[in-house]
Image (cartoon, coloured by chain):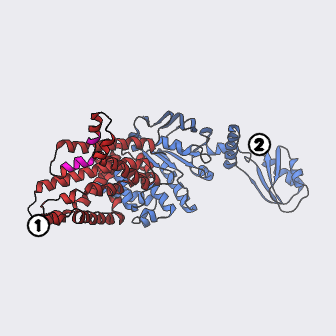
Amino acid sequence: MNLNMTAIVMRRQLHSYFATPVAYVFILMFLVLSGVFSFYLGHFFEKGQADLNAFFNFHPWLYLFFMPAISMGLWSQERQLGTIELLMTLPIGLGNAVVGKFLAAWLFSGIALLLTFPIWVTVSYLGDPDHGVILAGYLGSWLMAGGFLAVGSCMSVCSKNQIVAFLLTVVVCFLFMVSGVSMVLDAFSLAPQWVIDFVAGLSFLTRFDAIARGVFDLRDVIYFVALIGLWLYLTQIFLQRFKAN
Amino acid sequence: MIRVKNLSMKFDDFLAVNDLSFDVAEGEVLGFLGPNGAGKSTTMKIISGFLSATSGEVSVCGVDVSQDPQKVQKMMGYLPEGAPAYGEMTVAAFLDFIAQVRGFCGDKKRQRIQAVVEQVQLQSVLHQVIDTLSKGFVRRVGLAQAIMHDPKVLILDEPTDGLDPNQKHQVRELIKGLAKDKIVIISTHILEEVSAVCSRALIINQGKLLLDGHPEKLEKQSRYHNAICLQLAEDVSQAATLLEGVANIDSVEQIQERKFMLFPQDGQMLLPEVVRWLDTKNWQVENLHLEKGRLEDVFRQVTTVSQKEAC
C-alpha cells in the first residue's frame, strides 16, 4: 500500500466529481431530500424531541439511491472510455487505485453529509440535544455510506454501462438492507439458526439503527469496516478479471 | 532490452498471439506491422503489463513483467490505442496528475511539465478541457503523458493515427529525437511511417511473426525492388512486347498509355541494360526511374499468403 499513490488517485477522482455541475446538483438534491424526509415524513417538529432520529432514520433509504449514483462511474466510466488501460499501466498498483477511488467517493459523500449541519444547528437552537449521540449518528451514517459505496465500487467494475452499475448496486444494497427485516428472515425459517443469525447480522438497517440511537457498539463499526474491506477486495479481483474485456 | 519469448495469448477460443518471440535492443525503434486484429495491440498490452499472457515470458531490462509489473511500468512510457485521457480534465491538470504519479513534485514537476508541453507543442491548449480538443491534440496529450518521465522504454500504439501530415511529421521527428538511447516500439498500419522512423520492422499476422528486418531489407523482398518505371514521350506500337525482350526482364506491366513498369528477374539491376537498349531503339523517354521496393507490396504479399494458409 502506497499512501502517496492512493492520495494522488483520490485527488484526481475528487477533481473529476467536481469538474461538472452534476456534483453540485447532486449535493443540492441530497440536502433538499434529507430535509423533506426529516421534516415531512419524519415529523421532526411535531415530535418535539431534541434529537436527530427523524433525520437519521431515513438515511439508509436515501443512500440506497444516492450512493449508487456516486459510485456508478468509478470504474465503469474508465472501462467505457478506455482510460482504465492508462490507469492500470501507470505505476500506481491495483490496490492503491481501488482504495484511492473509493476514498474519493467516500469523501464526496462525507461532504454532502457535512452540509446537512443546519439541522444540527436547528435542533441545538430549539432544545438541548445529546451532542454525543448526534456525532455518533453522523459517524455511523458516514460508515454506512462507505458500505454502500464499497458495494457500488465493485458493481461498477462489472459493467461498462453506468446505469447497469447503478441498478446492480441498488439491488445488492437493497438485499443487504432488508436482510434483517422479519419478512426476509421468515423466508429462511427452515434454515438452521446460525444461517438466520448470519443473514440478520448482515443487515445495514439493524446495525445502523443501533448507531443512530447513540449505541456506538464496536462490533457495528467492525461490521461496516469489514464490509468495506471485503467489497474493495472483491473490486480488485473483479478488476483483474474484467479490466480488458 | 526487451525480450519476448514464446508469447501466446488466448481469449476464449481465439488465439490472438501465437508463440511470438523477439528481442529489442537499446537504440532500436521497432515498427510493429500487421493488418487489423493481427495481435499488435495485444502484444503491446502484455508488454505494458495491462494484460497477463496465457503463456510465455516478457522481460523489460531484465525485469519479468508478470512478476513485477510496477517496476516495469516505472521504466516505461505507454500510449494505449486511441490515446485515452480523462476528458473532463484540462490538459494542464491531466499532465499534473501524470507528473505526480511519475514521482515529480514542486519546481521539478513544473519544469518537467513545461518541457513536455513544449516538446509536443501543447502550449495553445494547456487550459482547455481535453473533451473539447481535436483528435490530433488528444493524441499529443497522450504522447506527452507517455514521455513525461523521459522513460527508457516507450511503447506507442498507433501514435500518429488521426494526425494531419504536418503533425505526423512532428511526431516522427519527436520519436527519432527520443530514440538515441531508448527502446521504442511503435505499432502502425501506415507503412511509410516504418520507413520514416523505424530501424527495424516486424510484420505479424494472426499473432505470428512473419518477417523481421530493417525496413530497407524488407523492401528488397518486394517484386518492385530494382524495377524500372518508364514513361515514353510518344506512342510506340507493341512497346510492352518489345520491352519484354530486353535481357533479365521478367515481366512488363503497362500502367498507363505510355507508362510501363519493368520487373527484373530475381531483383537484378536492369538500369544499364534498359538505358542501352532504349538508346539503340532511339525511343524518346519522358521519365525513367528506379524503384527501391515497396513495403506495402511485401506487407500484402506475406499477410495474404498467411491468411490463405490459415484457410
> Which amino acid type corresponds to the residue marked 2 in the rendered image?
Gln
Dominant secondary-structure state across the stretch colored magenta: helix
- The magenta span reads A199-210
Is residue A238 visible from the viewing direction of this image?
yes
Q: The red chain is which one?
A: A
Question: Mark 1 — residue?
Answer: A126
> Is B138 placed left or right of B32 in the picture?
left
> Which amino acid type corresponds to the residue marked 1 in the rendered image?
Leu
* Chain where mark 2 sits: B
> Is B284 placed left or right of A39 in the picture?
right
- Colour chain B is painted in: blue
Q: Which mark is residue B268?
A: 2
Which element type, helix, strand or loop, lies under badge 2?
A: loop
Q: Report crowding for label 1: few under 14, some 14 to 19, many 20 or more residues within 10 A (C-alpha).
A: few
- Provide residue B94's location: percent of width, then percent of height: 38, 58
Residue at image location 76% in from the left, 45% down from the top: B269
Which residue is most to the left? A128
